[in-house]
Amino acid sequence: MSAAPPIMAVQNVVKRFGGFTALNDVTTSFAAGRLTSVIGPNGAGKSTFFNVLSGSFPPTEGRVFFNGTDITGTPQHKLAHMGIAKSFQITSLFPKLTVQENVRIAAQAMRSRFGLWQPRSALNLSDAVEALLLRVGLQDRRHESVDTLAHGQQRSLEIAVALACEPKLLLLDEPTAGMSPEEAREMMDLILKLNAERTVILVEHRMKLVMGISDRIVVLHHGTLLAEGTADDIRRHDEVKRVYLGQSV
Amino acid sequence: MESNTRPAATAKAGPMGGLVAVIARHRVLAALVVLAALPFVTPYEALAVNILIFGLYAMGFNLIFGYAGMLSFGHAALFGLGAYGCGVSIAKFAIPWFLALPIGIAVAGIGSVVIGWFAIRSRGIYFAMITLALSQVVYYSAYQWVSLTGGEDGLRGVNVPAIDVFGLHFDMLDPLVKYYVLYALAAVAIALFSRILHSPYGAVLEAIRENETRALACGYDVARTRWLAFILSGVFSGFAGALYAIHLSVVPIETLNYFNSAEVLMITLLGGMGTFFGAFVGAYVYIMLQDVMTVVTVHWQLVVGILFVVLILFFPRGIWGSLLKWVRA
Ligand SMILES: Nc1ncnc2c1ncn2[C@@H]1O[C@H](COP(=O)(O)OP(=O)(O)OP(=O)(O)O)[C@@H](O)[C@H]1O
Ligand SMILES: [Mg+2]
């Protein structure tokens, strides 16, 4: 759909858990700078797909490419340094640390290897942390511990932590999960702003939410790639209509 | 844990709460002040030396157990390698103490590099079992290699009768002088240890313990970070072992025994896992208790077993951990 080289590509990716096939021969690519949404019903394999892209586990078969480099089987922490960050569907933070320290520790990953002798403050991360907190609107909560935050704020912190490693590619797994419609709208606004600076791939199973903002939509169903294209393409797609029967598309 | 990354909490009022809060804030100074006074609050000096050394040992063990969240059941090997490394250097090769100490630390360091490499990829009970198994390998090696280690009888002749530094003469046969010489050496280790906890690396260790999945996604090499924690932990434990050899003038084979791994676990639990000051609180209470109980009953180990169960069931934070919780509640 565009001439820009893909930042991320998968070729014939299969992921099996024992005898169960969660991803079945998925081939697609993601253009740099765009906002692509991956949608599909519960259990379609969206999170599994993200785990393969972010290197949480390798695919059972097939290959994964990042900026043209084969990254199949590359450990996740190395991919983070290459510029792939992810936010989790189920909030995954450092629960006993403060909001600020959550962001600081995430930002630190890109700065130092193993600083053993200098104090933490010597890394001068406070400006970066400040900017990230401002970005997601948590600057007033910085000294609170994560488990005292409201759900929506935890979801925002999840984004800030993912952003802290200055990713080229941001993978967001249902960032609006459990949010009120109002909060979800704000989150979508934020995602659009983030997309202005980097490639974003968004998982969302509420189709309506993403229709307006996505450059491209990929539909997964039972682990197979059912359809891909613009919002209009997807709306008109017969099989997508059948899968989402009863929902307004 | 005494960490500046936790949410600030209102400190409990009252002298007790204030004291705990002050100690937590100035942990190195507090540990050094308390340890300096130790010979005067123990029945005899040799007991104070034991508390100092086992406190140091527990501090090192705590890095992997309390801060990295992995239960090693093989730290006796690292403590013991430090003790034998230093002891053999002095007893068999007549190497001066100031070289024997770093040799002991290096031997323990090499031991932890190897044991850690095998163990670090396993988790939970498997990690405990692998470290236990490998420490037993070290135990039997020392047991068999009689010409070097003295085998079953232990290593004799680790004699450091006097220490001369900067024109000062210290008579190590005087128990109080010996205590303060070992104290000065331990002080360096305590300060270094605190620095590591405060470093960016210390923060990563905390983060991994809190949420390994997230730490990986952030770009931290979890396996390597843990391996380094095991090595550092082994180095500090080995240093404690090396001091132990100098303290006793012998290295008993029991330093390598798994019971020594259990004891450091007990001390750490008693004081409070993942707390800096807790290691020394635990060592004080445990060793004082042991000193009293061995007079009362020969079944001291049974008492230890009961203590262990009580700790796990009713007192998981330990003494210092509970005090910190209370102050911050
Ligand atoms: N680690 C695993 N082991 C076994 N089965 C798994 C594992 N992870 C996912 N699955 C299965 O793979 C299928 C796809 O799961 P996945 O989490 O990728 O779906 P999803 O599209 O993200 O769903 P949702 O919208 O509910 O988040 C499900 O049937 C799930 O039970
Ligand atoms: Mg999912």
Image (cartoon, rainbow, N blue to C red):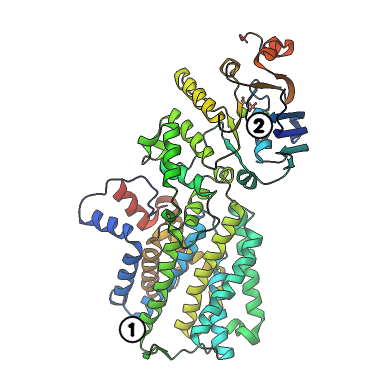
Q: Determine whether, in the image, residue B179 is placed left or right of residue A78.
A: left
Q: Determine whether, in the image, residue A218 is placed left or right of residue B238.
A: right
Q: Secondary structure beneath disc 1?
A: helix
Could one spot residue A131 in this view of the protein?
A: yes
Which residue, given by chain and number where applicable, does mark 2 sit on? Answer: A32
Q: Residue at x 54, y 25 (%)?
A: A192
Q: Secondary structure beneath disc 2?
A: loop
Q: Which mark is residue B230?
A: none
Q: Which mark is residue B176?
A: 1
**A203 and A146: which is toward the camera:** A203
Q: Which corner quadrant holds the C terminus of chain A?
A: top right
**B177 and A175: which is toward the camera:** A175
Mark 2 residue type: Ala
Q: Residue at x 35, y 85 (%)?
A: B177
| Chain label for disc 1 | B
Question: Within 8 Å of ligand 1, the CB of disc 1?
Answer: no
Q: Position of residue A102 (x, y in %)?
A: 46, 43
**B131 and A29: which is toward the camera:** A29
Determine the CA span between mark 2 and mark 1.
Answer: 71 Å
Could one spot residue B73 in this view of the protein?
A: no
Mark 1 residue type: Leu
The image quadrant that residue A226 belongs to is top right
Q: Residues within 10 Å of mark 2 (few under 14, many from 20)?
A: some
